[in-house]
């Protein structure tokens, strides 16, 4: 499954050991961390002459950190890792092209100071 391969790729290429699906835990021991979700998925790519086997997903990666400086370091590492990437993932899925399409920094309101960055990638794969 594409998401499992992308998360393995993320684990292998970042220093952030804590990666969660959709929601981050409230415990401060879990930061910095990354959450992920697939915001959309298009299963086939139609061309003029035929239907290819390519699919596209929109992957949202949210980075949380108690330090804005650390947040930017992690954000930049993820952007470098995914933006423009093409190649084969560990499970054999071939990424044709990955592109950063949106990036927003901010903070999370609550009892603790927590910074958040949201990176949205469009990833076309076979």
Image (tube, helix red, strand yellow):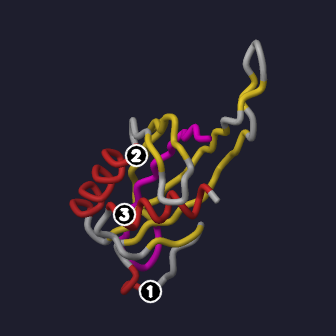
Distance in Å between CA atoms under marks 2 and 1: 28 Å
Q: Quick one: 100 or 31, which is closer to the camera?
A: 100
As drawn, 112 above or below 29: above
Judge the density around disc 1: few (<14), some (14-19), many (≥20) Cα neighbours within 10 Å.
few
Left or right, 105 with respect to 54, comes to left
State the SS at label 3: strand
Residue that mark 1 sits on: 27
Predominant secondary structure in magenta? strand
Residue that mark 3 sits on: 115
Please say whether residue 65 is one of the residues in the magenta stretch.
no
Percent position of residue 76, x then y: 28, 49
In the rendered image, the quadrant that contains the C terminus is top right
Q: Residue at x 52, y 72 (%)?
A: 20
State the SS at label 2: helix
In the rendered image, the quadrant that contains the N terminus is bottom right
Point out the tag, 2 or 1, that comes first from the N-terminus: 1
Q: Nearer the viewer, mark 2 or mark 1?
A: 2
State the SS at label 1: loop
Point out the tag, 3 or 2, that comes first from the N-terminus: 2
Distance in Å between CA atoms under marks 1 and 3: 15 Å
Q: Residue at x 44, y 86 (%)?
A: 27
Query: What span is in magenta?
Result: 109-126
């Amino acid at each position: 499954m594409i998401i499992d391969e992308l998360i393995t790729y993320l684990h292998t290429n970042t220093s952030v050991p804590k990666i969660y699906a959709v929601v981050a835990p409230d415990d401060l021991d879990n930061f910095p961390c990354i959450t992920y979700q697939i915001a959309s998925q298009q299963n086939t790519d139609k061309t003029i002459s035929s239907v290819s086997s390519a699919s596209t997903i929109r992957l949202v990666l949210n980075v949380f950190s108690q330090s804005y400086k650390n947040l930017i370091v992690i954000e930049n590492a993820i952007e470098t890792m995914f933006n423009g990437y093409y190649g084969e993932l560990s499970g054999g899925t071939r990424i044709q092209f990955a592109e950063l399409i949106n990036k927003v920094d901010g903070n999370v309101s609550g009892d603790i100071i927590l910074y958040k960055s949201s990176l949205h990638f469009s990833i076309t794969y076979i």
